[in-house]
DNA sequence: TCCGGCTAGATTGGATCCAATATTGAATAT
DNA sequence: ATATTCAATATTGGATCCAATCTAGCCGGA
């Protein structure tokens, strides 16, 4: 809706800190393996340690940090290997979700997907990176949710969360936006025809492109 | 090592509360869909709300509870359908882990697995249900860890955690213990021969038996 | 010199108190 | 009677303070 969208601060401090921490970790500002000093970070974000610790628990669940009782949290390495692993796991889980979704897909689902795709294209055209990342996410999750497997969708969502910060990187690159749009259209087309295998392979390619682009960014 | 192991209280209150909450939810004492009153629960467990909330964040990550800002946590339904879904997801992820593990399996890994299996058999013989559940877990995780995919192992572990309380139910039933032992031996045998497909199908059966047994418990 | 125990500082874990938000019910206006 | 507003209450979110635990460096003894 709003064109500027100056990243509104979330309704709770934990959610705010959670987003900040994700960025700090994925951008490498908090270096892998280093301990997380709660006092210093809390002060930096201008909150107390309580919401900070709750955010850290969430990140622990996502595997971005490790935890040892009475010793605290440590930044988990997110190397290229890790990224590849996450994408491999996504491949496995999303294939299952998509196959189930194709079986159950109704006309209303297709309409929702097309509306989501329209959003993606709108932001792609205007070059609004953050917004496009959000719309892209809605598109994919809408599809996954058609699987009728809520726990599976949850897991996939968590995997997306844990690599969130990278994605806006991806959409920042010029050519990638157009390709995403084209690939989505191909997926939608295959969905309409109920061609499960084709949908799966198209999405695999879709991911592979993202991995390839991100690999070059991460290797320097 | 210790044979008695009278469920020592964990070193932090959050971990204690976490275990208690898991039991309370999976046994149905906290009814699905009902809100979680932090004050009441904290008093019941004789801790403050701080560690309780951190435990709830962990459970949220596992999908045992839902969360809405400023409205709190709610017990998530864990119906038979959910259990089936969890096992289906495990099937997908564990197959990947096991195939990778078979490729990389060394003699030392096999030795560790056999030692783990010896533990399982020891507790199976004496009918120590809790201990056997623990040893069983060690056996499987040891195998998964041979995959060299730490994030994948993490995910699988989380899935096991979220249905932990059910498993001791399973091992309580008389005949199940002997079958588990026999099935593990079959898996070990196939592993020695490097027969990946056979390992996968044996583990699938292994899970299927557990699901079947748990289904009868959950349907009444 | 090397090892162990010990003390002081740093850091995390938890309890209590206050603030912010949501919910409930009653009073009022239509 | 129904809908709406507003106040009272319940509940969650967060800040501060204190306790428990870990870490690092020092000291004494073999």
Image: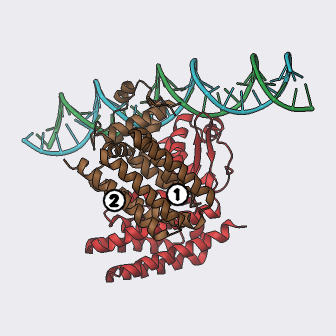
Chain colours: A brown, B red, C cyan, D green
Residue at image point 61% right, 74% down: B212
Is B111 placed left or right of A9 in the picture? Answer: left
Residue B135: in sight, yes or no? no
Give the Cα separation between the discs numbered 1 and 2.
18 Å
Mark 1 falls within which chain?
Answer: A
Above-or-below relation of B54 to A5? below
Asked if residue A188 lies left or right of residue A76, the reply is right
Residue A195 on image: x %, y %: 50, 69
Whether residue B167 is situated above or below residue A220 in the rendered picture: below
Q: Residue A208 — which label?
A: 2
Chain for numbered disc 2 = A
Foreground of the two, B60 or D30: B60
Which residue is the extreme one toward the front?
Answer: A125
Q: Point out residue B144 in the picture as x, y percentages from the top left corner.
A: 38, 66
Tell me residue B117's x, y (percent). 41, 73
The disc placed on residue B68 is none
Residue A208 spot, x, y in % from top left: 33, 59
Answer few, some or many: residues within 10 Å of disc 2's Cα (few below 14, many 20 plus, some between 14 and 19): some
Disc 1 designates what residue?
A144
């Amino acid at each position: 809706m709003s064109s500027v969208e100056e990243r509104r601060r979330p309704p709770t401090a934990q959610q705010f800190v959670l987003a900040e921490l994700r960025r700090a970790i994925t951008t490498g500002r908090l270096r892998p393996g280093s301990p997380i000093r709660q006092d210093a970070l809390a002060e930096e974000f201008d909150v107390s340690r309580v919401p900070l610790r709750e955010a850290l628990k969430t990140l622990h669940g996502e595997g971005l940090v490790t935890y040892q009782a009475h010793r605290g949290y440590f930044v988990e390495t997110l190397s290229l290997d890790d990224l590849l692993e996450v994408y491999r796991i996504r491949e496995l889980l999303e294939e299952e979700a998509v196959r189930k979704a194709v079986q159950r897909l109704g006309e209303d689902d297709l309409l929702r997907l097309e509306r989501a795709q329209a959003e993606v294209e709108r932001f792609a055209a205007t070059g609004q990176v953050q917004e496009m990342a959000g719309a892209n996410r809605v598109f994919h999750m809408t599809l996954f949710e058609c699987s009728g497997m809520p726990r599976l969708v949850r897991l996939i969502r968590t995997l997306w969360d844990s690599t969130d910060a990278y994605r806006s990187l991806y959409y920042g690159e010029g050519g990638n936006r157009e390709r995403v749009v084209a690939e989505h259209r191909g997926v939608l087309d295959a969905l309409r025809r109920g061609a499960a295998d084709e949908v799966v392979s198209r999405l695999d390619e879709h991911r592979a492109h993202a991995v390839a682009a991100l690999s070059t960014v991460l290797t320097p």
